[in-house]
Amino acid sequence: MDQLNNRPIGRWTYIALVLGAALGMFAGLTPSFHAAGGIFVRAVGTEFGWGRSVASLSYSASMLGLTLGSPLVGMLMDRFGIRRVILFLGLAYALAVIGMSQQNGSIALWVGLSGLVGIFGAAVSVVGYLAVMPQWFDRRLGLALALAMGGLGIGTMIMPPFAQYLVSSYGWRTAYTLLGAGSIPLTLLACMLIKERKVVQRSGQPGRSAPADGVPLAEAVKNYRLWAIWLVFLVGSSCTLALVPQLPTMLADRGFTPADAARGASVLGIGLLAGRLLTGVLLDRIHAPFVACAFFVAGALGIFLLRASHDYSALLCAAALVGLTIGAEGDLISYLVRSYFGLRSFGTLYGLCFSGYGLGAVIGPVAIGAYFDRYGNYDQALVILPVLLLIACGLTLTLGRYRDAGQRPGDVTSSQRA
């Protein structure tokens, strides 16, 4: 049990915090919109006579919205509080998903609403729910992030078949409505469970307190490490997320059955969940840049195997390795920002760094798809991607040691926090 301002903090506070974040991400942007998006692409494309490229614009538009919305959501959280922003924008996200049911064949409406889903959905993604974790956890921050991200991983596995059931049974319009409406009670429950805790320092004057420890925003944006983190995850997500929509096709192109190809995508999802849990355990014991390097190397090896092997078991292993890397990236962004810049402007800085990850999720799939359209294969792309991951690995090592927390008498120390 910890102490803050002479008030005891029980274990339930920490359990509720992790559970709330997990529930919120379970029903948030990634599971209920991105993971289920492929189900709607087929149904909506068939109704309006769109090709796959047009129907797939929904994913790209929502990822671009997430990229643009993440820094904005971070700034709003720093100013108005995390729970308020999640609550307000979470309701807006639900309405935007419900609005997707009103498509009339207009490509502008399809793309525009998807973009709004991404912007509002940033608050009910890792950007919103993971931002509260560093306020409460220090020594076990990695484990807390991993457990919370487990909700996202489970949602990613459950939502696609659930969406398929809704589309098959009731139609895609009803499915969008139910997914959007269903996110509301879980968002409300998540906001009830999570609690904000602003760690303050003594200012040296009675009755006055200084802001939470950390690097001021104006100083942080001039710091090399911030932009290095942004670039690392831009490159990392460009390489790994590029393969998510392409993996079933890659396996099918090599003569495997549709069921075998789908199994490969499922193994990637299993690797993703395992990566999230493993990253959390490792971050609490090993310097975060070393952990990042290990997962980037794993991803590079997985992509190399995808190119070099035709053995189904080896290809499944490759998919799992790529999934491990994807699963690690979300936890690493939060942990690195907290470790190098503290809590003072955490929401804004986290949102900014996550925008690099989101931008990579736009660039990667588009680039590798364009490469295939031009050359009819993925050969050279699968040579370039591992090299880029190794470059990201080297860039991560330049981050160096964590910043000095500069604890002073009266601060909340690591030994006092979970």
Image (cartoon, helix red, strand yellow):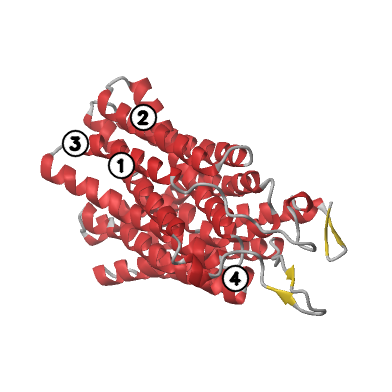
Label 2 amino acid?
Answer: Leu
Q: Nearer the viewer, mark 1 or mark 4?
A: 1
Is the residue 85 above or below the residue 39 in the image? below
Alpha carbon distance from label 1 to label 4: 38 Å
Q: Position of residue 221 (x, y in %)?
A: 45, 67
**Chain-order first, disc 1 or disc 4:** 4
Q: Nearer the viewer, residue 82 or 297?
A: 297
Q: Amino acid at mark 3?
A: Gln
Percent x, y for residue 34? 41, 54
Instruction: Answer with the quarter of the image where residue 312 lies.
Output: top left
- Disc 2 crowd, CA 10 A, few/some/many (<14, 14-19, 20+): some
Badge number at residue 380: 3
Q: Which residue is mark 2?
A: 301
112 left or right, relative to 368? right
Residue matched to label 1 = 388
Give 19 or 329, whichever is nearer the viewer: 329
- Check disc 4 and give the amino acid type: Leu
